[in-house]
Image (cartoon, rainbow, N blue to C red):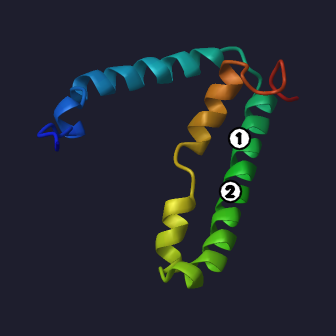
Amino acid sequence: MVSDFSFDSAAFAPPPTLIAGAQIVIGGAIGVAFVGARLAELSSIVIYGIGSTLIMIAMAIVTATFVAPLVGMRIEALVLSLVPGGLNEMTLVSWTTVISDRAEMPE
């Protein structure tokens, strides 16, 4: 028996104002965690963020270069599908919530 039920995720999307409000709250919470931080601490976080981003982009390019001939797709399309979205945001959240493997920010 085939079900007539179909799920449309767009029908259950949260309202844009709720999404915008959540982003403001999350951004404020991350920003408050940096109050009183020294410039040296912030610069090291930026350096780690840039470094990890470049590493992830390089890994995506290398992987796409090897996989493209095997699957018959353009390298550009594969790079876009492999580059992680939100990498910098995840890094900031891990530092501000002390989820990382360090108990405090790097010096």
Residue for point 21% across, 26% down: 15
Q: Which one is nearer the viewer's eye here, 3 or 56?
A: 3
- The quadrant in which residue 105 appears is top right
Q: Is residue 60 above or below residue 45?
A: below
Q: Which one is nearer the viewer's eye here, 1 or 52?
A: 1
Residue placed under numbered mark 2 in the picture: 56
Mark 1 neighbour density, 10 Å: few (under 14) some (14–19) many (20 or more): some
The quadrant the N terminus occupies is: top left
Residue for point 77% across, 23% down: 38
How far across and how far down the image is residue 21, in percent? 33, 20
Q: Is residue 103 left or right of residue 83?
A: right
- Dot 2 or dot 1: first in sequence order is 1
Amino acid type, label 1? Val
Amino acid type, label 2? Met
- The quadrant in which residue 25 appears is top left
The residues bearing labels 2 and 1 have C-alpha atoms spaced at a distance of: 15 Å
Secondary structure of residue under mark 1: helix
Secondary structure of residue under mark 2: helix
Circles 2 and 1 in contact, beta carbons < 8 Å: no
Residue placed under numbered mark 1 in the picture: 46
